[in-house]
Amino acid sequence: MIAVSDVHHHIGQAQILRDITLTLPAGKITALIGPNGAGKSTLLSLVARLTPLQQGQITVAGLDVQRAPSRELARTMAILPQNVAVFSRLRVRELVAFGRWPHHQGRPGPQDAAKVAAALHDMGLDDLSHRFLDQLSGGQRQRAHLAMALAQDTPWLLLDEPLAALDMAHARALMQTLARLRDSGKSIVMVLHEVNYAAAWADHVVALKAGRVLAHGTPETVFAPDVLGALYDTRLRVIRQDGRPLVLHHL
Amino acid sequence: MTSVGRLPWPGLWLMLALLMVGAVYLLAGLGPRADVVLPLRATRLAGMVVLGVAIAVATVLFQTVSRNRILTPQIMGVDALYILLQTGLVLVLGPVGFATLPVAGKFTLELVVMVLAALALFGTLLGRGSQDVARMILTGVILGILLRSLANLIARLMDPNAFAVVQAESVVSLTRLDAGLLPFAAAVTGLAAGLAVWLAPRLDVAALGRETAVALGLRHDGLVMLALALVAVLVAVATALVGPLTFLGLIVVALARPLAGSARHLPLLITASVLAVLMLVAGQLVFERVLRLQSALPAVLEGAGGVAFLWLLLKGRIR
C-alpha cells in the first residue's frame, strides 16, 4: 500500500496540501479526483518523489520515498507525469525501451525487448513504433509515454491525467488495460478529471478539495450527490448505470 | 544501445576524412627542415584535436543538461568566467608574476576555481528550476555580458603591460597554442571526454526530462552537477589553449546531430568530436598552406558557423 502521513506542502505563500494522511490500497485502481487546484497532481508528484517532500512521510510498498535508493523506487513504481517533453528526437520504440532502464541500466536483454513489445501492443502502437515522437498527434504521444510506463513493469503505476489527450475509444481501451493490470495484481493510482471514468473503473476514490481530503473510500461512498456537490460546488445528479454510479453534470 | 562498434556510416566516413586530412596536414610540403617543421605541426595538430574534442563534448553535455539546442557554454558565459579568472590573476600577481607561474600549478588551480564557480553559477540556473528556458537563456546571456564587462573593467584599471597580457589571453588564435600546456590539457580532456562517454547512457535518460529521468531511477540533479563540472573543465581547457570560441561548438553539434544517425549520446559525442577536429584541421590546412594566412581561421569558422547555424535553424533542422 501507499501510506501518506501528515503531509503538508506549500509553493511560496500558497498552501497546496494540508495535513494529508491516508492509505491507498494495493491491488486496486485508485482515482484522485477534485476541482482544479485541489492538490491532486501535487500529491501524486510527492508520492512519485518528483517533488521534494516538505513535511510528513510517504511510503510506497514499505519504501520511504525520501530515503529509498532511486533504482529500487523505479522498480517499484512507474510514473506518467502531467507534462512530458522529450529533448531527444526519438522513435516510439526507443522511448518505450527507456521504460526498461531501471532493470538493465543500459544493458538490455531479450526479456526487455519482450516487455517493450508487449507494452507497445497494449497501447495499440505496433504500427507507430518506428515513427518519431514529433510525427505523432498529442494522443498518440500520450499513449507512447503510457507504454513506457507499462514497459517499466512495476507493482505500482502512478498516472497523472492519463486520459487528457485520448479520444473516447483509446480512453476506454486504456481503462480496460489498467483493469487487466489490476486483475493481474498491479496497483494503479491516477489523477482523473472526468469523474465518470473514476465512477466506472475505480475501486477506491480520494476526493481532494483546497488541499484537504474531503472524502475517500469506495465509489459508492464518494459519489454520493451531497459529497460531489460539496466537492465541485456545482449542481449535478448521480444515477446508477450497470451497477455503478454515473454523474450527470452537463445539465 | 548504440555501441562504438556500431557507429553509423557518416561517423565512420568523418573519421576516415579526418585521418586523411591529418596526414596531409602533417606530411605535405615538409621541405628540407622536416626535423624542425614536423614537431611543430604535430604539436599544433595535437592541440587542434584536444581543442575540438573539448569544445564538442562540452557543448553536447551543456545542451543536454540545459535541454536546449541553441545554447553553448560560451553563449552562457563559461569562457567569460575563465577570462575573468585570468584577468584577476594578472591583477593580483602582475604581468611578470602571471607569466612566471608554473604551468601545471596555474592550470590546476584555474580548473578547480572554474569548476567551483561554474557549479555555483550554473548549477543553480540549470538545476531543479530549469523549466523556464527563456528565463534561463536570458539570465545566462546577461551573466556572460556581466562577466566579460567585469573582466574588461579590471583590465582597463591595469597598467599597459598587464593590459597587454590580458588582451593576449582574450584574443582567439590557433597559432598561440602553448606547447607546455598541451600535455596537461590533453590529459584533462581525455579524462573528461572518457567520463562523458561513460555517462552517455545516463545522459540519454536525462534527455527525457527531469521528471521522467527521476521516475526511471536516475539521480538527475547529481548528473547535472557532474556534467556541469565537466563542461567547466573542458571550456577552461579550450579557452586556455586558443582563447574564447563562441560558435564553433554550436555549429559542430548542430551538424553532428543529423550525422550521428541516432539521438543517443555515445554516437553524438564521437561524431561531434570528430567533426570539430576535422573542421579545425581542414580549415587550418587551407588557411595555412593555400591562403598563407596564419590567424584568420577562428574568425572564418565563427562566421561560417553562425551562418550555417542560422540556415539550419530556418530549415527547421534544429529542434
Image (tube, coloured by chain):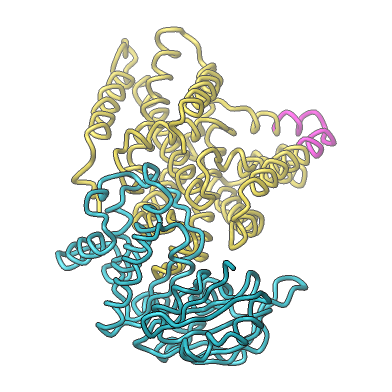
Dominant SS of magenta comes to helix
Q: Residue furthest top?
A: B291
What is the drawing colour of chain A?
cyan
Q: Is residue A243 magenta?
A: no
Q: Position of residue A123 (x, y in %)?
A: 29, 61
Q: Nearer the viewer, residue A156 or A190?
A: A190
Q: Position of residue B252 (x, y in %)?
A: 44, 32
What is the letter of the yellow chain?
Answer: B
Q: Can you say whether A215 is above or below B133 in the image?
A: below
Q: Position of residue B159 (x, y in %)?
A: 82, 32
Residue B156 falls in image quadrant: top right
Q: Quadrant of the C terminus of chain A?
A: bottom right
Q: Can you say whether A43 is above or below A140 in the image?
A: below
Q: Quadrant of the N terminus of chain A?
A: bottom left
Magenta span covers which residues? B152-165
Residue B56 falls in image quadrant: top left
Q: Position of residue A24 (x, y in %)?
A: 46, 89
Q: Which residue corresponds to the image point at 70% horizontal and 71% vertical from the top-left?
A: A11
Taking the image as shown, residue A145 lies to the left or right of residue A56, namely left
Q: Nearer the viewer, residue A147 or A100?
A: A147
Q: Nearer the viewer, residue B18 or A105?
A: A105
Can residue B221 be seen by looking at this rendering?
yes
